[in-house]
Image (cartoon, grey):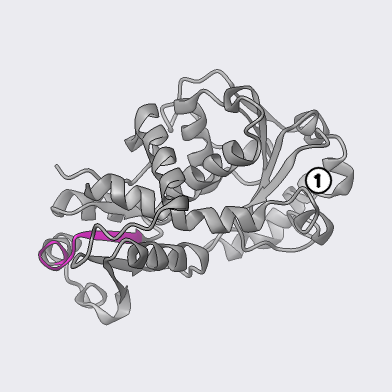
């Protein structure tokens, strides 16, 4: 079966490190290996950074990005994913897919003869986290990646799941800080790394942190839960009082878009420790590296 990237768990440590090396190369060299290739982008959910970074990446690789609106396809009128995937495989060389349902992602992969890349599902956001861990290593290169303390504040969502999986593969020291009922299910993720810690006390979690990462408390599609989530997460806001307990050289990360004065304050988001724009920039190189890894 064709290699796809549906989950970070589809990659080994060596493969992740290979993608990181490709990212390094793409930062210094132009590369047009895929002239004449076509890569589809099927997005069922809103996207700014992920969609644009992939379109730019595809173009820089010499291929043609083709945006596909689900409502314009026969899927919206009941045609099966299996049939659609077979047709896409005739026309495209790869598909970048954003959807709510991870099972639909798997169905596309099972019926395709081209690589499928998960550009976000409710379960995971693998391309974001691969890019973010590269960014951590790039900006804090004086420290050993495996010895850094990475702390995530917020919902046990797709970002948290992908962080846990990559921490398991790379043996990272990861702390997930959130209310107990919102913790990611490590057993469901099939993780074995004892370095992943669940902590419900924000001040305890952030102590001597090298990396502070947060995400929205209410993800796309969960708007009906917003009032309850605002109550449940009110003590988990990343603000200056909290970040003052981390290492002075810490970096602050957010995959964006941010909800100001909910999960993070404006002061922290735009502080000297914030690397949100470097994260966004590196998504292009991650997209290039992932596509080159899957297509080469």
- Residue 216, given in percent of the width and then of the height, sits at 64, 56
- Residue 56, given in percent of the width and then of the height, sits at 41, 67
Residue at x 27% of width, y 53% of height: 116
Give residue 271's quadrant in the image: bottom right
Give residue 22's quadrant in the image: top left
Residue at x 56% of width, y 26% of height: 172
**Residue 41 relative to residue 86: left or right:** right
Among all residues in the image, which is located at the extreme top?
Answer: 194
- Residue 26, given in percent of the width and then of the height, sits at 42, 51
**Residue 43 relative to residue 242: left or right:** left
- Residue 268, given in percent of the width and then of the height, sits at 80, 53
Residue at x 53% of width, y 38% of height: 163
Nearest the viewer among 6 and 235 is 6
Look at mark 1 in the image and give the residue it sits on: 235
What segment carries the magenta color?
Answer: 88-97
Vertical arrangement, residue 31 with respect to residue 145, above or below:
below
Instruction: Report the label total.
Output: 1
Vertical arrangement, residue 52 with respect to residue 136, above or below:
below
Badge 1 crowding class, 10 Å Cα cut-off, few under 14, some 14 to 19, many 20 or more, is some
Nearest the viewer among 4 and 160 is 4
Vertical arrangement, residue 79 with respect to residue 288, above or below:
below
């Amino acid at each position: 079966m064709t290699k796809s990237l549906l989950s970070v768990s589809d990659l080994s440590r060596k493969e992740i490190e290979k993608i990181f090396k490709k990212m390094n190369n793409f930062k210094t060299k132009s590369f047009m290996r895929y002239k004449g290739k076509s890569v589809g982008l099927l997005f069922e959910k809103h996207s700014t950074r992920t969609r644009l970074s992939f379109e730019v990446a595809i173009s820089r690789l010499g291929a043609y990005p083709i945006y596909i609106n689900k409502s314009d396809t026969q899927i919206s009128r009941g045609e099966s994913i299996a049939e659609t995937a077979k047709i896409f495989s005739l026309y495209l060389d790869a598909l970048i897919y954003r959807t709510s349902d991870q099972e639909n992602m798997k169905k596309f992969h099972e019926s395709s003869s081209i690589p499928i890349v998960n550009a976000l599902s409710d379960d995971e956001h693998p391309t974001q986290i691969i890019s973010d861990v590269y960014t951590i290593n790039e900006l804090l290169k004086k420290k050993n990646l495996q010895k850094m303390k990475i702390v995530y504040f917020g919902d046990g969502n797709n970002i948290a799941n992908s962080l846990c999986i990559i921490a398991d593969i790379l043996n990272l020291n990861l702390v997930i800080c959130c209310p107990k009922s919102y913790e990611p299910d490590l057993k469901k993720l099939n993780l074995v790394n004892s370095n992943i810690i669940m902590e419900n006390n924000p001040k305890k979690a952030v102590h001597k942190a090298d990396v502070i990462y947060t995400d929205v408390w209410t993800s796309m599609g969960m708007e009906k839960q917003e009032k309850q989530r605002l109550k449940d997460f009110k003590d988990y806001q990343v603000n200056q009082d909290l970040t003052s307990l981390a290492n002075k050289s810490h970096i602050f990360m957010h995959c964006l878009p941010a909800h100001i004065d909910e999960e993070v304050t404006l002061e922290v988001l735009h502080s000297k420790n914030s690397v949100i724009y470097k994260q966004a920039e590196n998504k292009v190189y991650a997209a290039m590296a992932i596509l080159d890894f899957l297509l080469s």
